[in-house]
Amino acid sequence: MDCNGYRQENHEQNLFPKPKVLVLEPPPVFIYHEDKLSQKFHFLKAWDSPLPLDQFLTTHAHSVQAILSHGSCPVTTNTIRLLPSLGLIVTTSAGLDQIDLQECRRRGVSVAYAGSLFSADVADIAVGLLIDALRNISAGNRYVTQGLWANNGDFSLGSKLGGRKVGIVGLGSIGLEVGKRLEPFGCNILYCSRNKKSSVSYPYYSTVCELATNCEVLIICCELNDQTRHVINKEVLLALGKKGLIINVGRGAIIDEQEMVRCLMQGEIAGAGLDVFENEPHVPSELISLDNVVLSPHRAVHTEETLMALVELVIGNLEAFFSNKPLLSPVLLDE
């Protein structure tokens, strides 16, 4: 580009400045695709500033109309109150437990989220964790790579997936995708959800404990809120029983993690497949040492294809907001 080209570009940027968007911590979509996002918006990077957060927010208080956030980055009452011009929070997660939705309602701040964008990827991981836990794939890998096969002989037997009674906790978009994937394996699907779904024929149970009593596998797909925090407790785990498996692709705090560790250590449940944990990225050392537990570092939603789709969704929501158009994936805060 020649000098005239640069002058014209700078002149256009001065006439039409990019909308400012606050980023408290960089979400994966920002880490991988900052260049594309920055073509449209000017990002204020709170984590990159030497100022304490409150001071940084106060400095930009009247210029910030939108926040880009993610699942492990809290957007608190204090943050919202320090930004009087705030009108939108875009989170790259499907879960909303990290955002003070009550304060958003009070202030009239809109929220956009990933919606069902991740559902297929999360369901894939849920089924993968289940197959791994049943067939001991990760444990078998360690058995080979540690040289135990040659020294100790054949590896222990696994268990079949077909014919299993699988209970899904939360039959939303992710839960439905899990059920769709498990049916061809010959699994019997049961579920517990806030409401009975007229669109499916799966047996419905009104409580998680009742569901656990009637199945061999529990797959956690629900959101984390005040009602679901530690809903998988000692009573539920004991109801699942000594041959039961638990798979969690929801949020770590849906399970009472200490109680789950105790049940695993004492053989009161057979195993677990976990993509989420209560105090991420910290994982109880007991879980790491167990061969009947499969662990994944909260990566269920992270595929190249979905991350690209998420970039477009983030851009679309921000552009809609700054153009006074309807959001592409709004959270209905009145619910």
Image (cartoon, helix red, strand yellow):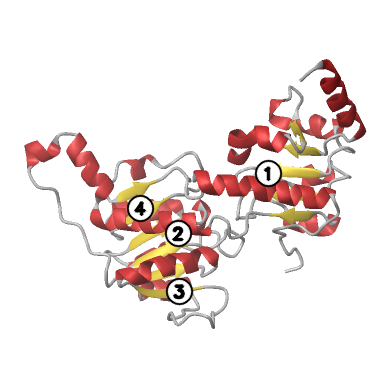
Cβ atoms under marks 3 and 1 closer than 8 Å: no
The amino acid type of the residue labelled 4 equals: Arg
Amino acid type of the residue tagged 3 in the rendering: Tyr
How packed mark 1 is, by other alpha carbons closer than 10 Å (few <14, some 14-19, many 20 or more), is: many
**Quadrant of image for the C terminus:** bottom right
On residue 191, which mark appears?
Answer: 3
In the rendering, which numbered label is found on residue 69?
Answer: 1
| Mark positioned earlier in the residue sequence (2 or 1) | 1
Distance of label 3 from label 1 (alpha carbons): 31 Å
Please tell me which of labels 4 and 3 falls first in the chain: 3
Task: Identify which residue, 225 or 69, lies in the foreground.
Answer: 69
Q: Earlier in the sequence, mark 1 or mark 4?
A: 1
Counting from the top left corner in percent of width and height, residue 296 is at 41, 45
Quadrant of residue 44 within the rendered picture:
top right
Which residue is labeled 2 in the image?
A: 123
Label 2–label 3 contact, CB within 8 A: no
Q: Give left or right: position of 169 versus 195.
A: left
- Toward the viewer: 257 or 275? 275
What is the x, y in percent for residue 280? Answer: 51, 42
Label 2 residue SS: helix
Q: Find disc 4 in the rendering and name its residue.
A: 262
Task: Count every numbered label the image shows and give the total.
Answer: 4
Q: Amino acid at mark 2?
A: Ala
Q: Amino acid at mark 1?
A: Ser
Q: Residue at x 53, y 73 (%)?
A: 193
Task: Give SS at disc 3.
Answer: strand
Among the two numbered marks 2 and 4 on one chain, the one whose residue lies closer to the N terminus:
2
Q: Nearer the viewer, mark 2 or mark 3?
A: 2
Q: Circle 1 sits in a helix, a strand or a loop, which is it?
A: strand
How far is the residue under mark 2 from the one under mark 4? 27 Å
